[in-house]
Amino acid sequence: MRAASLAKNLSPSRRRRSFGARLGGLGLVLLAGTATPRPEQPPPYGLPQLGPRTFPALFRPKGPIAMRGVTLGPIESRLQPNRGYGSPSFDVTLDEIERLGGNWLSLTVFGRVFDLTSTSIDPAFEAPLEETLRNMTEAARMAHARGLKVMLVPHLWVESGGWRAELNPGSEEGWRRFRDSYGRFIRIWAEWAERNRVELFSTGVELRFWVTSSEAKTFQALVAEVRDLYHGPLTYASNWDDADDTEIWRSLDVIGVNGFYPLHWENSPSDEQLDRGAIEAARRVRALGERFERPVFFSEFGYTTRKDSMVEPWLWPEQLSQIVPSEADQARSYAALLSQVCAEPNFLGAFVWRMYSDIADLSQEPAWGFNPWGKQAESVLRDAFSSRFAVEKAPAATFEPGALRLLSPQKRQGLPH
């Protein structure tokens, strides 16, 4: 790792404290990251400074409050007015999030690249940037008025198709142009996040080509710039299969993983096989947090509403043909994964992928898509969100590991497999 050592920010006595100790028992829990010392300034969230950095957005006086989060996808098209962030429809969607037991929202803003060789990013997406900024401000205000917390996730959209993780700026000059353009894009939203008191800011999503390469040091430099603009905690959303290879974790405060873990390798798995897959996912979460001395959360996780969605959960609905819809397999997958990872003491929580800013708009994805609203998976989420996570120092029996134990016997009977 090329980031400055965590030890430089801690006294010898605090360096000896375990990762688990830093998650609890400090009053307001302090996660001292690798931020450079800054001049004295007013606390960003109205709480006293206890050290180099405090994160009241994530923690409370008696310890962490787990993230029970939902990703709400934007609807920015002018062909569908009054359905996007900050709209009356968005307000109705917040009602549903509260009924589900959610306490966090993930809001997504896009920058557009033309193809996988592009070196410039257009910060406008389907609406002018100024309009998006206004709508996002209203969305954050509406969420905060309800006591919901907000994670902002600036995302890259590849217009020609392809996965952003496979972007390749090419030459040294191409990399310079790309870094400059991405820096301008991310600074726009870091400044917005600071103005609107957003509780968590993601510095990027699935940028494998950058953060697992020799260029990772330049991303860490960008993180340092972002810290001068936004004074809350920072994360990054890695893909589940490259989180271990990501080089930037020690420059951030919380490890984000897009947790689309396969729970089995062949179709029609039993509950016991799903258990084993979820146990392996939880082991990886635990090892990642211990290695980098950071708490871990799922910046995204989800399963589509189709048979055997737990085998390749990352597949988009539009990529699939000959679908056999299955609410049961979606629900079984949710229950297996959540019942294991939420029992991990360094797991902060998860953001469900995903619903949309207008929850009643069913045109955004096929019926067999990721959205759990109104399906059996919604009941699993409701049970999970009403339970205490291990990070909240719940009794061991509260989140007993084991697939489907989040469900009552009556609900389990309704999930054939």
Image: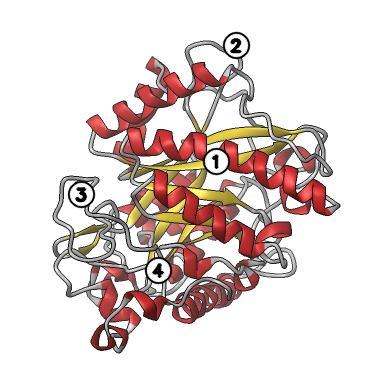
Q: Which mark is residue 43?
A: 3
> Which residue is drawn at the image coordinates 73% and 48% (left, top)?
176
The amino acid type, in three-letter code, at marker 1 is Ile
- Label 4's element? loop
Q: By what rule are the colours in the image chosen?
A: secondary structure
The residue that mark 4 highlights is 295
N-terminal-most mark, 1 or 3: 3
- Label 3's element? loop
N-terminal-most mark, 4 or 3: 3
Q: Nearer the viewer, mark 1 or mark 4?
A: 1
> Which residue is drawn at the image coordinates 44% and 59% (left, top)?
412
State the residue in front, 315 or 258: 258
> Which residue is drawn at the image coordinates 34% and 80% (left, top)?
19
Label 2 to label 4: alpha-carbon separation:
39 Å
The residue that mark 2 highlights is 78
Estimate how packed mark 2 is, as few (under 14), some (14 to 19) or many (20 or more) residues with alpha carbons within 10 Å: few
